[in-house]
């Protein structure tokens, strides 16, 4: 296993308010406790992400499932295994299916997304890969989303892109902090043993998507 680059802050070193947020992470996930325990080295960073994520990702003006599918697109694009191996419970409850997750890097040609979802993913694609946009692109965006929704989605994508690009460097993994919970884990990744088996499989998504990213 790759060496972890920044340690987890022990729960006993956190304030009661921080421990309460850690318990929420263990109970609800997205984010899971491990990334939150890394941010706890700097309480301002801990609360910056916790509060922004709550206000912009879990809540807000745009339907959550759209933000979740874009979060997962970023995971696949930057190959952040920690983030890509978890799912938003709220997104699952809204009907987001694994078949959609499996087809993220082929979203424009996929029959698994509607036109609004495809527009959101095109927005995420443009942000992640810094592609040029034109009047037709923005007409597409405005056809499907209000300006307020475009602002919130852009902020959510930017936040997750920055955090996932960082977290992928740290070699953190699930089931290491407040172990014993499967909250928000992707199907087949619910335990440490299942996680290890899934990551060792020849068709593990990160191995495939890393090869695709290397070709861009």
Image (cartoon, rainbow, N blue to C red):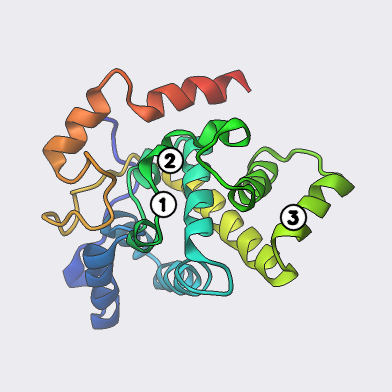
**For the residues carrying marks 2 and 1, which lies nearer the camera in this image?**
1
Residue sitting nearer the eye, 100 or 212: 100
- Give the labeled residue for mark 1: 96
Q: Is residue 213 left or right of residue 195?
A: right
Q: Quadrant of the N terminus?
A: top left
Report the Cα–Cα distance between label 1 and label 3. 21 Å
Report the Cα–Cα distance between label 2 and label 1. 8 Å
Query: How many residues crowd mark 3 within 10 Å: few (<14), some (14–19), many (20+)?
Result: some
Asked if residue 14 can be seen in this view, the reply is no
Query: How many residues crowd mark 2 within 10 Å: few (<14), some (14–19), many (20+)?
Result: some
Q: Position of residue 77 (x, y in %)?
A: 53, 36
Report the Cα–Cα distance between label 3 and label 2. 21 Å
Q: Earlier in the sequence, mark 1 or mark 3?
A: 1
Q: Position of residue 88 (x, y in %)?
A: 36, 57
Q: Quadrant of the C terminus?
A: top right
Q: Please, is residue 174 above or below residue 28 in the view?
A: above
Q: Are marks 2 and 1 in contact (CB under 8 Å)?
A: yes
- Give the labeled residue for mark 3: 141
Residue pictured at 69% horizontal, 72% vertical: 148
Residue pictured at 42% horizontal, 70% vertical: 50
Asked if residue 75 can be seen in this view, the reply is yes
Q: Position of residue 76 (x, y in %)?
A: 48, 37
Q: Please, is residue 133 above or below residue 105 in the view?
A: below
| Number of the label disc, if any, that sits on residue 101 | 2
- Say which element carries label 2: helix
Q: Please, is residue 199 above or below residue 147 in the view?
A: above
């Amino acid at each position: 296993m790759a060496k972890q680059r920044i340690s987890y802050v022990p729960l006993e070193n956190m304030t009661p308010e921080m421990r309460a947020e850690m318990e929420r992470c263990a109970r609800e996930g997205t984010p899971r406790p491990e990334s939150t325990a890394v941010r706890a080295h700097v309480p301002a960073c801990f609360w910056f992400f916790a509060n922004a994520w709550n206000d912009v990702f879990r809540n807000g003006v745009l339907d959550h499932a759209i933000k979740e599918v874009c979060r997962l697109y970023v995971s696949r694009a930057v190959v952040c295994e920690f983030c890509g191996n978890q799912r938003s419970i709220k997104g699952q409850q809204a009907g987001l299916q694994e078949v959609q997750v499996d087809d993220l890097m082929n979203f424009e040609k996929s029959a698994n997304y509607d036109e609004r979802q495809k527009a959101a993913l095109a927005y995420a694609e443009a942000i992640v890969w810094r592609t040029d946009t034109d009047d037709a692109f923005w007409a597409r965006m405005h056809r499907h989303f209000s300006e307020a929704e475009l602002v919130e989605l852009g902020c959510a994508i930017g936040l997750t892109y920055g955090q996932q690009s960082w977290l992928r460097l740290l070699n953190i993994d699930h089931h290491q902090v407040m172990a014993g919970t499967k909250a928000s884990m992707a199907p087949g990744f619910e335990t440490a043993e299942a996680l290890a088996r899934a990551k060792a499989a020849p068709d593990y998504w990160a191995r495939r998507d890393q090869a695709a990213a290397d070709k861009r």
